[in-house]
Amino acid sequence: MTATTNDLTAPTAATTAATATTSADDRRLTHLDALEAEAILVIREMAGELERPALLFSGGKDSVVMLHLATKAFWPAPIPFPVLHVDTGHNFPEVLAYRDETVERLGLRLVVASVQDYIDDGRLRERADGTRNPLQTLPLLDAINDNRFDGVFGGGRRDEEKARAKERIVSLRDEFGQWDPKNQRPELWNLFNPRHRPGEHVRVFPISNWTEVDIWRYIEREDIPLAPLYYAHEREVFHRDGMWLAVGPYSQPRDDEPVETRLVRYRTVGDMSCTGAVESPARTNADIVLEVAASTLTERGATRADDRISEAAMEDRKKEGYF
Amino acid sequence: MAGPTQTTAPALDPAAVAGAARGTLLRLATAGSVDDGKSTLVGRLLHDTKSVLSDQLAAVERVSRDRGLTAADLALLTDGLRAEREQGITIDVAYRYFATANRSFVLADCPGHVQYTRNTVTGSSTADVVVLLVDARKGVLEQTRRHLAVTALLRVPHVVVAVNKIDLVDFSQEVYERVNAEVQAVARDLGLEDAIAIPVSALDGDNIAERSERTPWYTGPSLLELLEALPPSDDPANESFRLPVQLVIRPQGAARDDAYRDYRGYAGQVASGVVRVGDEVVALPSGRRTTVVGIDLGERTLDEAFAPQSVTLRLADEIDISRGDVIASASDAPEPTQDIKAVVCWLGDAPLRPGQRLLLKHGSRTVQTAVRSLDGALDLDDLHTVPSEALSLNDIGLVTLRLAGPVPVENYSVSRRGGSFLLIDAHDGRTVAAGMVGATLPSSAPAPTRPEGDEEWDI
Ligand SMILES: Nc1nc2c(ncn2[C@@H]2O[C@H](COP(=O)(O)OP(=O)(O)OP(=O)(O)O)[C@@H](O)[C@H]2O)c(=O)[nH]1
Ligand SMILES: [Mg+2]
């Protein structure tokens, strides 16, 4: 099994993966298979209930897993909805290339909402700290309105962050795209209800119950190709806020931040200006499973500067309509 | 077929990835009155199993210090919303995850406050085990009774009673036994027979991950030991096969491969039981019979599928089956009906009244329904059914519904999946009730077993 394949057009080897034992006395799904079954249930149910859903696809590992699950959910038919990417303009070029190749390989329709366009025409202003994560909300909500999407699949996971830990799998957004964490709809059994009034929409999180280790075990098992920067590689980096930031067009070292070449990989791939790399020798999926299982830091704690600003940074962004 | 562990590199250290993919999954929800210590207990369980990462713990310690606390308030590991932290209560369910060598766990920390009961119902509807907390100083409170009633109605397979704050009653065996007897009496009235009790201090960790020396008179397992040993969910082989059809998959010209141009499959999750290639099945509500000729899971072809796998069935005949139908084993299929009696937990802000029209969602089918009659409501003080004109938010009542079309519902006591439904407000889309087909409420007043200090028993 080649974990670090750079052949991004290779078909996934879903056929080689086993799911469950089928002996009569042991019909129990493993944890990973139960998570897969739940995610496919949710994706299919929303495809049945909603009129115009879309799937948020950034090229990051969680959205890749979600897309892989959607492929299984509708096989051998194609995924019956477009994918939407909110492009901050600060993306890693490897991730954009991976995004485009994946869209091509799966025959998807890609809708791009561009933060750069909003900045260029004055609808958004660059922030003092230069990060663009919080700027994604407006282009996202406009894309939802303009395309009349009534539901958007997101790759958010409850283990990522404490506000996300509170989110329903199917979560209502009001006509302003806002989340009201104090008044969420009950979500009972495996019965999902995305009905809403005109102008409202739902966010759907099929992999809510997956942890970071689950994601990697699944990527390993299904041999899902990923953008190469998830695997150990040498990169010019500098140290800031306890993280390794890549030297690049959107992140330049200050005078007191010496540039070094280190063996690193990314645990998350967000805005280049605020997403840090971790030092790691992990070159294969199996290495990463072990590394993540033994990690003492959450993926956001290790790699995201923007979440360190305040205790409730994520909750505040989500209330406004962020992913 | 090779198992997942065989396809991975041999370097995997089983201890390092403890339970993460192999163990069975246990879903736990907390219950109990406000401030009885639910969030503290979940935080303690995470902490003592080393499931809290250092940046999370540091954040909780920082907030605790800012508030002048001397130790980390572990409830902050789940009480993550700004409003929850301001008020020191839980408002909505937080989901947390951890794994031991044998098992992986989903913890749903639910609120205790009566205003947020719908969130507690949300958390326990999918639970394999409910851990009901009771403050050893206070004993059974109204919310304790309401949550026990909900747990019993939802038929959560296991109930554990954690008699908490045992440190505040000097680790007294006598207090523990008194409180436990009180809880067990209520549980029995509600038909819960095997609630296991443990004396704990969520705050200090006594009997949570490890047995405590401060309760030498208690010889049972710690909470974690108990959770690890709970028997897993029912064997699907003992259930009848049901699959609610979510989608009909017919790629035609859009097929990802020309070989699948004529593919036609019925996609859904096996809600219960087992299905094999060659099995005779019936489509409901039409009643047409056919045979399973193929089972697909993505590109893989299976010989059999069982609950809760999400699969696609291919059938021998091109019969009319669409989204919302149920494919069931031909030998013991349920009878579709338009009239049902059910118990509902009312979760709507406006009351439920007889005559009201709503939508009902069962499996993947949504139909219109009218409330024929309201046949009683549960009185939480003495746990029996009383006549009622309307159900208010958080009430539990018995209703008769008329459906706009036949639906193959089952008795909830036979099948949690086949007997559960939602009631939905057609106007704004809100979910207003959790329904359980064929469930009943305690009809007569139970024998008086209440501790002194409570109001007069009325028969
Ligand atoms: N002494 C002592 N205090 C405890 C114990 N467990 C919880 N507490 C305290 O009781 C208070 C309430 O605890 P929480 O865990 O927030 O209670 P809860 O049941 O989650 O409350 P809600 O979610 O709002 O219903 C806090 O001040 C805890 O520190 C215990 O075992 N001993
Ligand atoms: Mg709480």
Image: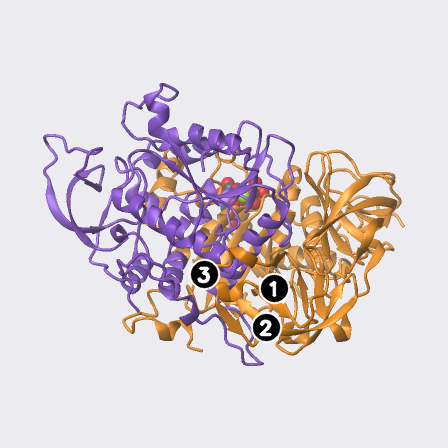
Report whether B53 appears left or right of A242: right
Discs 1, 2 touching: Cβ within 8 Å: yes
Residue at horizontal 23%, vertical 37%? A241
Report the chain holding disc 3: B
Report the chain holding disc 2: B
A73 above or below B142?
Answer: below
Residue identified by numbered label 2: B294
Quick check: do tags 3 and 2 share a chain? yes
* Amino acid at pointer 3: Ala
For mark 3, give the secondary structure: loop
Mark drawn on residue B201 = none
Crowd class of label 1 (few under 14; some 14 to 19; many from 20; radius 10 Å)? many
Tell me the shade of chain A.
purple
Residue at horizontal 57%, vertical 36%? A201
Number of labels in the image equals: 3
Q: Nearer the viewer, residue B383 or B273?
A: B273
Report the chain holding disc 1: B
Q: Ligand 2 falls in which quarter? A: top right
- Estimate the spatial distance between the alpha carbons at disc 3 and disc 2, rounded to whole Å: 46 Å
Residue at horizontal 32%, vertical 46%? A268
Label 3 vs 1, first from the N-terminus: 3
Label 1 vs 2, first from the N-terminus: 1
Say which quarter of the image contains residue A290: bottom left
Residue identified by numbered label 1: B265
Report whether A288 appears left or right of A168: left
- Estimate the spatial distance between the alpha carbons at disc 1 and disc 2, rounded to whole Å: 9 Å
Q: Which chain is orange?
A: B
Residue identified by numbered label 3: B209
